[in-house]
Image: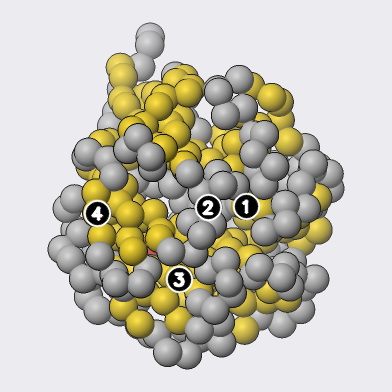
Amino acid sequence: MKATLTLAMLCLSLSLFAQIPPGKSVISSLHIYELKTKKSVEILKEHRHFEAPNWSVDGKHLLINSKGLLEKISPTGEHLGILPTGTVQKCNNDHGYSFDGKTLYISSSDPTSGINGSLIFKVGSEGGQPIRLTNQGPSYWHGISPDGKTMVYCAERDKNYDVYAMDTNGGPEIRLTSEEGLDDGPEYSPDGKYIYFNSYRSGKMQIWRMRPNGSQAEQMTFDDYSTWFAHIRPNGKEAVVISYIQDQKQNHPFGHQVKLRLLNLKNKKIEDLTEEFYGGQGTINVPSWSPDGSKFAYVRYELEDKKP
């Protein structure tokens, strides 16, 4: 795909084929950032493309996606095997666990369904044959309510991407946003009082929040970066976000200079956590905090010459 995409061509949280220059391939490295030391530790580096770590609720593994499959990686970088997802074999980078850790939500296309684009499925945390929840595509999971009863997701309907909610047992979808432009990355606060999301409604991609019924939308960031995906720390006081150094309009591409930042959810102050690095799509699309909230996982990328 081209590095610049029209809105109708993408949901920006979709796991893209990386926009890789001709003759190049990707090196992916999995990092853990510890807030106490303010340092990142690389735990895994491989000559392939993987994305979007989740941290299991029991703290025993990280979950990444690569080539349509979900893989378990230990917090020290050991491969723990593929998490089985039955006939769902095209998983993208929008996946994650319920607050109690018992259920995993997956976004994936399903050629057997006759529905175009990504759909949302749920399965037990140890894997199995997933159950499809959405009947329209594209739909991309991003968050779950603390009581496990409602999921929120980004979906394209009527040529606009908005935030929707649905019962986790399936049923009708409820539209929560209707502004022109992209609304994406919805995620519940641990107390269930807010849904945080990123929106282009101001003409710049910024972090917003709203009540679970879609009311009282409130802007949370106000700078010149393109900022995405507020992942709420388990204590409910801060969120890690990813910011593109250069304005990307409504796009969330792979392969640009980005940095990770910490947003104070009370006073809206924001501070840099990392230096600028090569990343973007796939770096931190989904919740990746450790259970105790002391650290989070993310992915950095490099390019190398393709081998003949």
Which is nearer the N-term, disc 3 or disc 1? 1
Which is nearer the N-term, disc 4 or disc 3? 3
3D distance between C-alphas at marks 3 and 1 = 16 Å
3D distance between C-alphas at marks 4 and 3 = 18 Å
Which is nearer the N-term, disc 4 or disc 2? 4
3D distance between C-alphas at marks 4 and 2 = 19 Å
Which is nearer the N-term, disc 4 or disc 1? 1
Assess whether mark 2 and mark 1 are in contact (beta carbons under 8 angstroms). Answer: yes
Is 71 on the left-hand or right-hand side of 37? right
Is 288 on the left-hand or right-hand side of 302? right
Residue 271: image tag: 4
Residue 2: image tag: none
Type of amino acid at the residue the image marks with label 4: Glu
3D distance between C-alphas at marks 3 and 2 = 12 Å
Near mark 2 (Cα within 10 A), the count class, few <14, some 14-19 or many ≥20, is: many
Q: Position of residue 166 (x, y in %)?
A: 68, 76
Q: Which residue is mark 2?
A: 287
Near mark 3 (Cα within 10 A), the count class, few <14, some 14-19 or many ≥20, is: many
Which is nearer the N-term, disc 3 or disc 2? 3
Q: Which residue is mark 3?
A: 196
Q: Nearer the viewer, mark 4 or mark 2?
A: 4
Residue 96: image tag: 1
